[in-house]
Image (cartoon, rainbow, N blue to C red):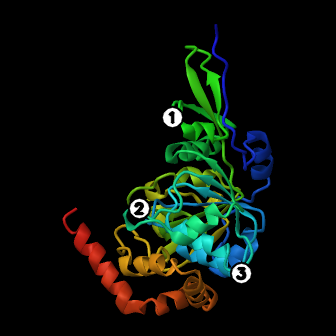
């Protein structure tokens, strides 16, 4: 007797249709034009209430903290988030919930959220998820990456073995299928085409050609899967530099809608080969979240009380503090 195929009971938040996505991408401009703008303008133009937003990087490494701050500062509402290896980025965005500024997070595809790895759990992010006001569907880190891979390939799904027989599968939106060649049971993972992708890179030119040092995680696929893509970079470089060594280009210009130069834009997270994470500031952020009243004062000071990310950096110690973090990263990588 054939065992019936099962499926997860979680809702699907992003349309996996490759044909629908193709209709959008067909209209996306691919001209080599200047895309340089401020973070404020990029978020205003490309992030809208109700959008599905995916943030690149991994854990607290190479996050676009500047864009996350601006999304909160502009009080975007009812966003769906990809919780793919999400640590401090999810912690920042959770500030848009339960602080008197509406409900920024409405839904989340959850793989890793709330925790900041060895640093501990975010009390406020935990309050947000335990409030019952945020819907969630569960996935593994790998499977969320596979969803971006499917979208980058222009498919509606990919087959995987991961999550079979787990509670994560039961709370996902995946479906069991049979391999047409072997008859083996696999999981069909729906493609994820975010409305907006956000990626922080080491270098970019004003057209959007990007370089990343170190691990790229799922970001090349995220760039190709996203309908709109905001890139923040540590520094702008001339387009001639890109042309002189095109093999180093990880994200090509035609995927990108906005380029924002934000030195130290991953702070307080780590930017590999650039600066170490500010563990003191991250610890302070976690500690202050234990008291909702003090936490609101903290957010009002560090996000709503500044006009941009540069002012936030000044509040956190400015150039002397950032230089120290750069020295720490240099010492850690000296032997590599």
- Residue at the spot x=53%, y=59% of the render? 113
- Residue at the spot x=75%, y=51% of the render? 25
State which tag comes first along the sequence, 1 or 2: 2
Few, some or many residues within 10 Å of mark 3 (<14, 14–19, 20+): few
The answer to whether marks 3 and 1 mark residues whose Cβ atoms lie closer than 8 Å is no
The answer to whether marks 1 and 2 mark residues whose Cβ atoms lie closer than 8 Å is no
State which tag comes first along the sequence, 3 or 1: 3
Question: Image quadrant of residue 73?
Answer: bottom right
For the residue pair 99 and 14, the one nearer the viewer reads as 99
Q: Whole-Å distance between the Cαs marked 1 and 2?
A: 22 Å
Q: Which residue is mark 2?
A: 117
Few, some or many residues within 10 Å of mark 2 (<14, 14–19, 20+): some
Q: Which residue is mark 3?
A: 100
- Residue at the spot x=75%, y=70% of the render? 77
Few, some or many residues within 10 Å of mark 1 (<14, 14–19, 20+): some
Please state the horizontal and vertical placement of residue 295, each as a whole percent of the image.
56, 83
Q: Residue furthest left?
A: 335
**Which numbered dot is residue 85?**
none
Q: Give the structural element (helix, strand or loop) at label 3.
A: loop
State which tag comes first along the sequence, 3 or 2: 3
Please state the horizontal and vertical placement of residue 214, each as a whole percent of the image.
38, 59
Q: In the figure, is residue 185 to the left or right of 14?
A: left
Q: Give the structural element (helix, strand or loop) at label 1.
A: loop
Question: Image quadrant of residue 93?
Answer: bottom right
Please state the horizontal and vertical placement of residue 273, each as a whole percent of the image.
34, 69
Please state the horizontal and vertical placement of residue 246, each as a whole percent of the image.
47, 57
Q: Whole-Å distance between the Cαs marked 3 and 1?
A: 40 Å
Q: Whole-Å distance between the Cαs marked 3 and 2?
A: 28 Å
Q: Which residue is mark 1?
A: 162
Mark nearer the viewer, 1 or 2: 2
* The C terminus - image quarter: bottom left
For the residue pair 24 and 97, the one nearer the viewer reads as 97
């Amino acid at each position: 007797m054939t065992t019936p195929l099962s499926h997860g009971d979680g809702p699907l938040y992003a349309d996996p249709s490759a044909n629908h996505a193709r209709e959008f991408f067909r209209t996306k401009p691919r001209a080599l034009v200047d895309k340089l703008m401020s973070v404020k303008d990029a978020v205003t133009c490309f992030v809208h209430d109700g959008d599905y937003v995916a943030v690149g990087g991994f854990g607290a490494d190479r996050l676009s903290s500047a864009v996350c701050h601006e999304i909160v500062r502009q009080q975007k509402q009812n966003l769906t988030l990809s919780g793919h290896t999400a640590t401090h980025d999810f912690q920042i965005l959770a500030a848009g919930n339960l602080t008197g500024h509406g409900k920024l997070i409405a839904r989340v595809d959850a793989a890793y959220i709330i925790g900041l790895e060895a640093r501990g759990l975010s009390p406020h992010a935990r309050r947000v998820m335990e409030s019952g006001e945020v819907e969630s569907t569960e996935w593994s880190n790998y499977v969320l990456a596979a969803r971006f891979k499917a979208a980058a390939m222009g498919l509606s799904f990919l087959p995987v073995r991961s999550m079979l027989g787990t509670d994560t599968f039961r709370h996902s939106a995946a479906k069991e299928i049979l391999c047409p060649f072997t008859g083996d049971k696999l999981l069909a993972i729906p493609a994820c085409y975010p409305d907006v992708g956000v990626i922080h890179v080491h270098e970019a030119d004003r057209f959007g050609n990007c370089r990343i040092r170190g691990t790229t995680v799922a970001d090349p696929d995220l760039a190709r899967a996203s309908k709109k893509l905001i890139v923040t970079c540590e520094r702008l470089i001339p387009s001639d530099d890109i042309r002189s060594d095109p093999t180093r280009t990880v994200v090509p210009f035609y995927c990108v809608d906005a380029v924002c130069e934000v030195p130290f834009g991953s702070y307080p997270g780590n930017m590999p080969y650039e600066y170490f994470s500010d563990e003191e500031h991250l610890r302070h952020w976690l500690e202050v979240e234990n008291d909702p009243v003090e936490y609101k004062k903290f957010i009002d000071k560090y996000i709503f009380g500044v006009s941009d990310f540069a002012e936030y950096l000044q509040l956190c110690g400015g150039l002397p503090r950032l230089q120290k973090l750069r020295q720490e990263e240099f010492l850690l990588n000296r032997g590599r």
